[in-house]
Amino acid sequence: GSYHSYQTHTSTKLAEYKNTVKLKEFELERINLLYSEVSGKHNQSAKENDKIAKKLEVLLDEYNSTRCDHVNEVNALTLKVRTLQHELSALKTGDEGIKDLIQILGSENISCNKEHLARKLVELSKNNELLKESIALKSVALEKALKTSEELSSALHHSNQPQVTWLKVSGREISSYQS
């Protein structure tokens, strides 16, 4: 009887080992499928990450180019504003010539022809009117240039905000892909 019980015990153990091997084979097959799926997703994520990095590079180049254009436009408008302000101050000093002439005409010590001075006064008055019109036009142009300059400065300032936020978010996403 002991041989028979030994053979039964051995058969039982062999059947247990076969079942354990089948279970382990099934688990290994499942793990290989999961590994293939995860590996495929990782490769796809790496490709998407590369695409995003290339898009980021292109967008940064476009942003920097546009920003340079805006900075140049703001600088040009600032120069135009300064030029217009200088011209306005020069035009405003033109009134002083008329005031001086009126003082000369009103003084008793006139040593030249009053008729000539009167014609000169009329000519200066016409010039003064033209200067006032020119000042008005240049004032409007100056206000418009200042407004445009302020709008561009504001746009330039606001254009920095989304990029900074996007770079921070993208930096986190890229680093999470690389981890």
Image (cartoon, rainbow, N blue to C red):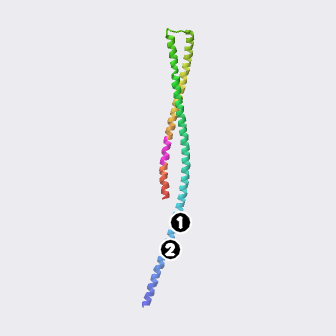
**Which kind of residue does numbered mark 1 sit on?**
Ser
Answer above or below: position of 125 versus 161: above
Residue 57 horizontal/vertical position (percent): 55, 50
Query: Quick one: 151 or 10, which is closer to the camera?
Result: 151
* Residue 36, disc: 1
Q: Which residue is mark 2?
A: 25
- Count of all numbered marks drawn on residues in the image: 2
Q: Amino acid at mark 2?
A: Glu
Q: Classify mark 2: helix, strand or loop.
A: helix
Region rendered in magenta:
157-165
- Examine the rendered structure and indicate whether residue 171 appears above or below residue 38: above
Q: Residue at x 51, y 13 (%)?
A: 102
Residue 35 at x, y percent in the picture? 51, 66
Rendered location of residue 142, percent (x, y): 52, 29
Residue at 54% over, 22% down: 131
Give the quadrant of the N terminus.
bottom left
Looking at the image, the residue that sits furthest to the bottom is 1
Say above or below: 129 vs 31: above
